[in-house]
Amino acid sequence: MDSGTHLVFGLGLGGLALTDPVISSHPYGPVAVLIGTVLGSQAPDADTVLRFKSNADYIRNHRGLSHSLPALACWAALLTLILSLAFRTVPWTHLLLWILIAVLVHVATDLFNSYGTQAFRPFTRKWIAWNVIHIFDPAIFLSHLAAILLWATAGPSRGSSSLSCIRSWRCITDGERSFTAAWPRSCPGKTPIGGKATATRCCRRCR
């Protein structure tokens, strides 16, 4: 599939992850898992850097080793490690689960088009291409995009989790105290006043 379709898969999985009570109940769980699923949905295509070497190398190796069975575990483990260091209080096992699902979805959907992948490597180096759907399928892309828009614009009674996730995402993208978001225990918004700790609004996620 194309990068845009993989992106909407990652965003959709980030929303689906909010059905996980461990993720949805954690203050930083929604944004951590959203970053993880988006990156996980793109990670196997990191071999695109081969274009800097030559187009021939890129065409010959794209969707090869980076889509193999060992690579699935490596991508998920690497992204989980990075996000666990940034969001230390978010349970890493749940992060790993959703990131792994994102990586698996990427490789699995690539099997269905004509380009092919070496998804069963190292057991076989054969290029698997089922040629069922196009590299870009408008129906798949637009249906996921519509679902994401509905999720993002849901009312408070139905979309509180999605709104929480969006606020978390905006907290990081706006650059407001990103280090505070990563290490909430050092949040400068908690200032002792009159012997009591009073929380101020240090970022949009706290609102």
Image (cartoon, rainbow, N blue to C red):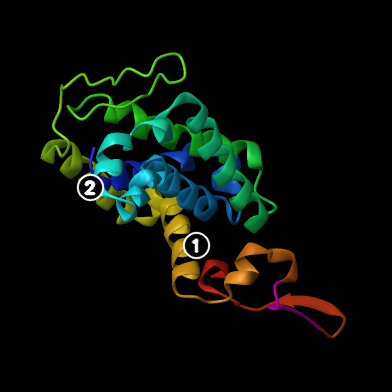
Q: Is residue 141 above or below residue 26?
A: above
How far across and down, in percent of the image, does residue 189 sit? 68, 78
Residue at 47% x, 40% y is 17
* Contact between labelled residues 2 and 1, with CB atoms less than 8 Å apart: no
Q: Is residue 181 left or right of residue 7?
A: right
Q: Is residue 145 above or below residue 179?
A: above
Look at the numbered disc 2 and give the secondary structure of its residue: helix
Q: Is residue 99 left or right of residue 134?
A: right
Task: Indicate the quadrant containing the N terminus: top left, top right, bottom left or bottom right.
Answer: top left
Which picture quadrant has residue 123? Answer: top left
Residue at 42% x, 60% y is 166
Task: Indicate the quadrant containing the C terminus: top left, top right, bottom left or bottom right.
Answer: bottom right
Q: Is residue 58 above or below residue 88?
A: above
Residue indicated by mark 1: 168
Query: Where are the magenta residues, as a range?
Result: 187-192
Tag 2: Cα neighbours inside 10 Å, few (<14), some, or many (≥20)? Answer: some
Residue indicated by mark 2: 145
Look at the numbered disc 1 and give the secondary structure of its residue: helix
Q: Nearer the viewer, residue 134 or 197?
A: 134
Based on the picture, tell me whether residue 172 belongs to the magenta stretch: no
Tag 1: Cα neighbours inside 10 Å, few (<14), some, or many (≥20)? Answer: many
What residue type is disc 1 on? Ser
Q: Is residue 132 above or below residue 175?
A: above
Residue 1 in view: yes
What residue type is disc 2 on? Leu
Instruction: Give the label on residue 72, or none.
Output: none
Earlier along the polypeptide chain: callout 1 or callout 2? 2
Q: Nearer the viewer, residue 196 or 108?
A: 108
Residue at 49% x, 32% y is 71
Which picture quadrant has residue 60? Answer: top left
